[in-house]
Image (cartoon, grey):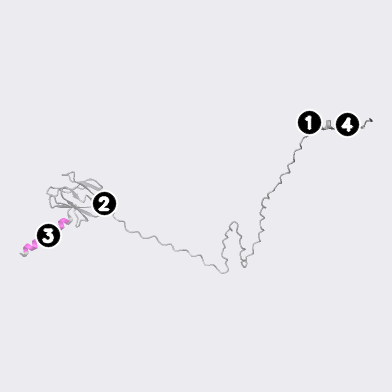
Amino acid sequence: MRRALHLTGVTVMLAAVITLFAPGSAAAASAHVMIAQYAYGPSTVTVTAGDTVSWTNHDQAPHDVVTTSGPAQLRSPMMSNGQSWSFRFTQPGTYSYYCSVHPDMKAKVVVLPASAPPQAPPPVQQPQRPPAQQPGQQQPRTTVPPRPGTTRAPAAPVPGVPAPAPQQPIAQPAADQQVVTQPQAQQEPVKSLDPMLLVAGVIAAVATLCLMLIASRPG
């Protein structure tokens, strides 16, 4: 009885070692694909580079896994009912595969790149402090131009620095004076005398003169 148990334990250990180092297999699978009712489920599996995908056949008919496109070519052995096959993907990309016995059975495995190691954050730059002012050293002053229309107050005198000469105010040009010209008096046009009136006046004067002559004659 003990010898039988011992032989059983040795057999189980040998089977585990053979499964571990068998080509196209891995100790633990990261994703599982079930083959049932002449279909792969799920039809799309997404893993990361370095992960392992295993297929298990639950149909009575035999099936396999053969890639049609992808970074690497895969071809599993024909799996009967209850058998499994695993593959470890190392190259990122999309692997499309089908069953060579049943071409209508199609699926794919999407392998994403492995995450890059976290990069160290860039060093934080410390703000630079201005150099300490030496005794007796005057700190430079920044001159800000005045805005248009504003007057700038004179700066306070600094000991040991001659005061700048006062600036003479710039005379602003006087605004244009508006010259108002009075319109010239409109001269009334001289009305010309009617010639008929002159003739009538001359006739009246001659008639008056004749009457005066007649009246002055002695009777």
Amino acid type of the residue tagged 2 in the rendering:
Val
Tell me which segment is drawn in magenta: 3-19
Considering only vertical position in the picture, is 35 above or below 121? above
User: How would you rate the neighbour count of disc 1 (Cα within 10 Å): few for under 14, some for 14-19, many for 20 or more?
Assistant: few
Kindly identify which numbered label has been placed on residue 12.
Answer: 3
**Badge 4 is on which residue?**
211
Considering only vertical position in the picture, is 2 above or below 181? below
At 83% across and 32% down in the image, what residue appears?
A: 204
Rounded to the nearest angstrom, the CA distance separating label 3 from label 2 is 33 Å
Amino acid type of the residue tagged 4 in the rendering:
Leu
Amino acid type of the residue tagged 3 in the rendering:
Val
Q: Earlier in the sequence, mark 3 or mark 2?
A: 3
Q: Is residue 11 magenta?
A: yes
Residue 4: x and y, percent?
6, 62
Residue 14: x and y, percent?
13, 58
Kindly identify which numbered label has been placed on residue 196.
Answer: 1
